Image (spheres, coloured by chain):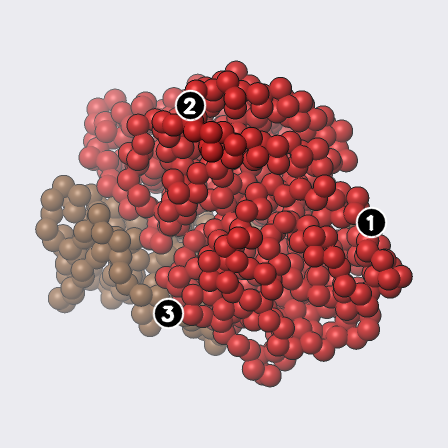
Amino acid sequence: MKDFAPAAAVPLRAPGEVLRLARMGAMMPTRLSFLRTLLRRLCAERARITRTHWQMSAEGHGHAVYAIPLAGHTYSLVAISNDLPDDQRSDRVIATAWDAAFVLFDGTPGAEDIARIKAQAPKQEAGRFGPRDLVLSRANKSVRMWDATVSALHAGRQPDRAMIRDIGYLMRTTAVYGNGKFGIADRHLIADRPGLGGPFAAEMLAVYMIRHFTLDLVQHVGGGTLDRDLAQHLGIGNATGLGMAPFLVTHPVLLHNWLHARETALARVRAVAEMSPDIRTRLHSLAARAAAHLAEWHVPAPDHDATLRQLETDWHRFRPQIDAAQSIDALWQAAQSQSAALQELLAALLIEAFPEHVDDLADSMGDAHGPLVQPFADTGALQLAIGRDWAWALGCDYAQADACKRFWYVSADKLEPRLGDRFADAGAALETPLDIARRVAALFAALPPQAQPLSTFLRDHPEHAMAVQRVAVLAHHPYAEIRDNLIAATCRPIDMLRCKLSFFGATKFDPKSDLWTRITLAQGAPLGDALSPEGEDWWLPVLG
Amino acid sequence: MKSWSWTETQALGVRAASGAGVPPAQALAFGAMLARHLADDGAEAPLMRALTAPDAVLGLAHRVETVVEQASVGGNSVTVEEADAGQRALLISWLSALPCEADLSVTGNTITAKLDLAAPSLRSRPARITLSDDLAADLHALASKTYVPDSDTSRASGAGAGLMELD
């Protein structure tokens, strides 16, 4: 991790401003997003995806293997396509069958490896995997997009452009597992490899190769060739539920590193003194692209669509500020009276416009070791730290029903995180400890009036050890905590999902409730046979 | 015997400790210790013995906290006495699993620890960890105590996506 001190004269935004759920729920992908970082590397290396196996029926059922070189290593995607009846197709983690299953394999799989993966991957969580299996995933077709594309290609024409614009993918992954799950390789085994060192890099590589496979498969079944601009606008969908949300709480150092890198990028760009004609032109170009992207981004949920339409209107009104502002920071300051959504869009745009100031920050977003923190000298020092860093958590009466209405838990059936109503549902006694604010408030209340060694306090109050650790981590990693009560009735997990997915590089967020969302990844990304530095400019893609 | 990834071994240890009634921070540390212990070919018996008495796990955690505290105030080396061989083995594994650099030596019942709290641990982790079927079953049994049984309500309102998603 890099030092906290900003590299620029402009201060970083305060954690208390950035890490509110309402703002996290408005975050946008940036060029520091993990998929962008990976693609930048692949483009720089002019990597090529090659198809090494293809045993597929006319209906598109069978298996395929793809290989891609990255920094001297070869990685292979083994894809298995199944015949899935419509009544078994579900995006839920509780599903037991999918249209396709995938393993990202370390190296080139032999016949035995392929046979093993063919047997195990369709079982997903019920399967067993080994240390050369890096990522496990599965996907379902977007039946509407898939059928329309196959029909069009069969008929010798291209699929409807508007449908591609509105849906944006042929298949949707419903889980992408990495880091040791179900026996697959631990992250530490590959973390020091160039290109895979960043957070979720292996998962992003798998997702990008899955997108390539879906394009191959639909053209095989349809018996035709997609126009390249249409193919490039077909990304890979993803349906994401609650399972992703706890990660942000259980990995505080990573959360800090992600946010710190992004906020440092913004501060560096705001410190750029000159607003030259070239910079103004670049900003106008990106602002026009953002406007076109917003115009193409519609979602079925009326409330979320209304938010998008408001952002579209606000953005249209704000764009003239690019001409009025005398500096980047003046442009940023002009946005401070605008909505969080507009500010986050502008932040992403500014970061996009200055790769030379921000791209190196991608190297600081991992966390190889976990928190290395000095323990507090005594409970007095701990008390001071809580008073300094946790005021946002102390002013709440957590005994009030609305302040503790929700509880997080893990279901026995599929071992998936869920959210319950403390006053209506069974299981609160088995609550997952994501109630960080409440725990720190309880610790603060339990501290003795006279300072004593921390080990003595924790011997008598071992239940507060977790809160002590969170305070110690936050003292050194100021972006490590979400500054909201995650068990309040008002907590919307969708905001946590939006934050995390924006760091993945997701676009076209399509929330289906407060608990889950669909997104698109790699839409507009260069195709697997056309990776080059010239093709790397695909922030907020537009089909037109 | 089955081989496991480090991450799933550690996660199972955390869950098992939670199921045994150990508070979250100590359960997390226990999981890290368990993975380290098994990776270093430590005996399995002391692990389950500790989990049958959560106070034993808390006692281990407290002793490690004390070592870290002493190291943070300038203790070049900190000594810990433990007569029980099983407990001593777990203490060594717990100290070895700290995220910081730990130089440990053992003489008789005495563990001497030199910690550099500012330096990350450089200890390597193996690609695979082997657990006996008995230990895995015992850990799973404890872990299962932390899961909430499914209900129609939890599936419908507590989870994510809708049931059928075709488009």
Q: Which chain is red?
A: A
Q: Looking at the rendering, which quadrant does residue A313 occupy?
A: top right
Q: Locate residue A162 relative to residue B78 in the image: left or right.
A: right
Q: Name the residue under label 3.
A: B126
User: CA separation, marks 2 and 3?
Assistant: 52 Å
Q: Which amino acid does label 3 sit on?
A: Pro
Q: Which amino acid does label 1 sit on?
A: Asp
- First in sequence: mark 1 vs mark 2: 1
Q: Name the residue under label 1.
A: A160
User: What's the chain of the residue with tag 2?
Assistant: A
User: CA separation, marks 1 and 3?
Assistant: 51 Å
Query: In the rendering, at what x and y percent does residue A253 appear?
Result: 38, 43
Quarter of the image with the C terminus of chain A is: top right
Q: Name the residue under label 2.
A: A327
In the picture as drawn, the residue positioned furthest to the right comes out as: A155
Q: The brown chain is which one?
A: B
Query: In the rendering, at what x and y percent does residue A183 appear?
Result: 51, 67
Query: In the rendering, at what x and y percent does residue A511 appear?
Result: 68, 37
Do tag 1 and tag 3 residues touch (Cβ < 8 Å)? Answer: no
